[in-house]
Amino acid sequence: MVIIEVSLLSGFVMTSRSRILLENRTIVMKIEVKANVVYIYLEKLNDESQTFILQLEQVIQVNNLKPASIKIYDYYQPGGLQISCYSSVGR
């Protein structure tokens, strides 16, 4: 099982439409939202390229917004952790 852990930008939430689109993907087993983190549980990954789009909605205006992290790891072997960061993009 592979987990994609997306820390949300300060003042942002994931839209319900985004959750529905993710849940409809056959590779996605489960989605959890805890505090400001979205956990996407995948059955497995293979060599095929995958793209996941999360639509976020700004609910609170935050100045000097800092980048947030995305972590991808195998649930059973978290030592192979991959980390990336993202920032707010234009509307």
Image (tube, rainbow, N blue to C red):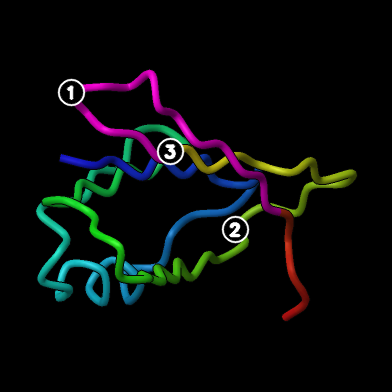
Picture residue at 44% right of the left edge, 29% below the top: 81
Front one among 75 and 86: 75
How crowded pointer 2 is (Cα within 10 Å; few <14, some 14-19, many 20+) is rated as few
* Secondary structure state at the residue bearing disc 2: loop
* Magenta stretch holds residue 29: no
- Given the image, on which type of amino acid does mark 3 rest? Val
**Residue 64 position (above or below residue 80):** below
| Pointer 1 with pointer 3, Cβ within 8 A | no
Location of residue 5 (image quadrant): top left
The residue tagged with tag 1: helix, strand or loop?
A: loop
Q: Tell me the number on the disc at residue 76.
A: 1
Secondary structure character of the magenta stretch overall: strand
* Badge 1 or badge 2: first in the primary sequence: 2
Name the disc covering residue 37, or none. 3
Q: Quadrant of the N terminus?
A: top left
**Magenta-colored span:** 72-86
